[in-house]
Image (cartoon, rainbow, N blue to C red):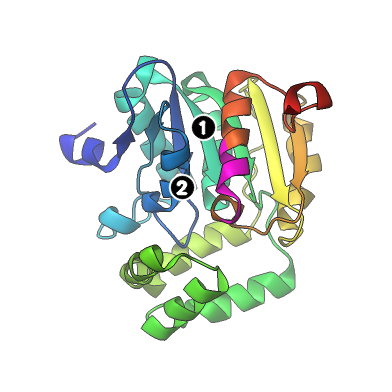
Amino acid sequence: MSTARALDAVEHGVREGETVLLVHGSNVAGWSWAPQVALLPHSHLLTPDLPGFGGRHREPWPGLDGAADDLAAIVAERAVGGHAHVVGLSLGGILGVRLAARHPGLVRTLLVSGAPLVGVGRGTAVAARVQVGLWDRRWYWRALATAMRLDADVRDRFVDDGLRLGSRTGGRVLEDVLVPSLPSSLPYRGRLVAVAGEREPRDARRAFEALRAIAPQLETWIAPGMHHQWSAEDPVRFSAMIEAVADGAPWPPTAATAG
């Protein structure tokens, strides 16, 4: 992997123990994991920008397979021991599954949240495609930041990254997200947890049954009261979930372990 690409995998914490790779969603970049970075100070974390996003906005979107291979190269280069616990939100969840399908030996555990692996409903797809036409307008990203309840200190970065992503790249990414993306098989047989927010669209939870058909070890959970971007909505609980899955602990905590 090139030095330039290696620098895109932002590292946090001491490079020892086991690595957690955090893969962002389609409207943000690696900076969106800042709450988890703050709450997991003793973990070695990688928070890369995907091609076409954030600091890599000049790179073309390589498609799901290309993006998964890009993540694989980052894990091989930067993760302790060359493998990582993989956490993905939304698009990041889709890519986490694709990474585990194409490079199962790199994945210690896999945690995906809000991943519409079997596509989205017609109404959601129509609305999303209409919004692509607005992606080059600053007011749209400002309105979206407000709707997502983003903190004031990250709103400008969110708006700037959205504008840099642009309607051309964003449209290509969106088409990969809206249609079924679940691979036909999943050779990865490690721990796999799929989560959906109780208040997010049902597209993510609709994927549970199909995912279990290729990954019988699947564990599922509905996060009570949470929306799609709940890594920011309840970062303490999201971070606790990351730790539990990586450590092999039950999630959600059982009555015996919750205290």
Label 1 to label 2: alpha-carbon separation = 17 Å
Is residue 253 or residue 53 the one in the foreground? 253
Is residue 161 or residue 247 the one in the foreground? 247
Q: Is residue 17 above or below residue 218?
A: above
Q: Is residue 95 above or below residue 14?
A: below
Write down the region rendered in magenta.
233-239
Among numbered discs 1 and 2, the one appearing first in the sequence: 2
Q: Is residue 198 left or right of residue 56?
A: right
Q: Circle 2 sits in a helix, a strand or a loop, which is it?
A: helix
**Which quadrant, please, contains the N terminus?**
top left
Q: Amino acid at mark 1?
A: Val
Q: Which mark is residue 128?
A: none
Q: Amino acid at mark 2?
A: Pro
Residue named by callout 2? 35
- Residue at 56% across / 47% down in the picture? 235
Q: Is residue 235 left or right of residue 60?
A: right
Q: Which mark is residue 86?
A: 1
